[in-house]
């Protein structure tokens, strides 16, 4: 097992600090392949969980909008670079920043770390959709919270 932040000391939703959301997680048996390393597609699940928890932490109408069906976010583009593998019981951290927010979309950068070691880099483009699945403007309160709390310059 590799050293990292103890999972028990971190809030379940992670924290937003210095313009980045930090989301801790532990690698479980179900996350690994026959060789005991994290199956490549599971990094997408880790990144999705981290983005969702980040949006909930913003407390700017995200949960209400998604629950009511008024808005949803869909990944429209994802580019992944796998740099090093993670293994069973590793404690990882997904760090998320939003690099650009436009009317109905946003782009983000996510990195998966084990301690200080960078394992995976993701560039993600997301679209905001209405209940009919059509592009919709990101609600102003949510857009302002994203820009003020999760951009590299904040």
Image (cartoon, rainbow, N blue to C red):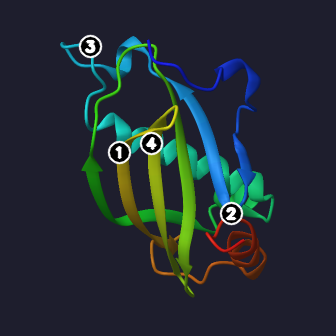
Alpha-carbon distance for marks 4 and 1? 5 Å
Distance between the alpha carbons at the discs numbered 4 and 3: 18 Å
**Label number found at residue 153:** none
Position of 41 with respect to 107 (left or right) is left
Labelled pair 4, 3 in contact (Cβ < 8 Å)? no
Mark 2 vs 1, N-terminal side? 2
Where is 43 relative to 33, above or below?
below
Residue drawn at x 63%, y 70% is 151
What kind of element bears circle 4? Answer: strand
| Disc 3 to disc 2, C-alpha distance | 34 Å
Whether residue 67 is visible here, answered yes or no, is no
Q: Quadrant of residue 147?
A: bottom right
Query: Mark 3 falls on what kind of element?
Result: loop
Disc 3: which residue? 36
Looking at marks 3 and 1 on the same chain, the residue that comes earlier in the sequence is marked by 3
- Residue that carries the numbered disc 1 in the rendered image: 120
Crowding at mark 4 (Cα within 10 Å: few <14, some 14-19, many 20+): many
What residue is disc 2 on? 19
Identify the residue shown where x is 36% and y is 22%.
Answer: 31
Residue 58 in percent (x, y) is at: 76, 59
Residue 41 on image: x %, y %: 28, 38
Query: What residue is drawn where x is 26% and y is 13%?
Result: 36
Locate the C terminus and report the quarter of the image it occupies.
bottom right
**Which residue corresponds to mark 4?**
112
Q: Is residue 44 above or below residue 26?
A: below
- Going from N to C along the chain, the mark reached first, 4 or 3, is 3
* Label 1: how many Cα within 10 Å (few below 14, some 14–19, many 20+): many
Q: Residues within 10 Å of mark 2 (few under 14, many from 20)?
A: some
Marks 3 and 1, how far apart in space?
A: 17 Å
Q: Nearer the viewer, residue 135 or 104?
A: 104
The percent position of residue 20, horizontal first and vertical second, equals 64, 57
């Amino acid at each position: 097992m590799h050293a990292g932040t103890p999972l028990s000391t971190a809030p379940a939703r992670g924290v937003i600090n210095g313009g980045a959301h930090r989301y801790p997680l532990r690698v479980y048996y179900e996350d690994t392949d026959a060789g005991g390393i994290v199956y490549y597609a599971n990094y997408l699940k880790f990144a999705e969980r981290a983005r969702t928890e980040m949006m909930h932490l913003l407390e700017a109408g995200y949960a209400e909008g998604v629950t009511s069906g008024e808005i949803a976010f869909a990944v429209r583009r994802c580019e992944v670079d796998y740099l090093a593998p993670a293994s069973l019981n590793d404690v990882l951290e997904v760090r998320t920043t939003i690099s650009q927010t436009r009317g109905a979309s946003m782009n983000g950068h996510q990195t998966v770390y084990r301690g200080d070691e960078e394992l995976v880099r993701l560039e993600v483009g997301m679209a905001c959709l209405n209940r009919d699945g059509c592009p919709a403007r990101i609600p102003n309160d949510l857009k302002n919270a994203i820009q003020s709390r999760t951009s590299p310059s904040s």
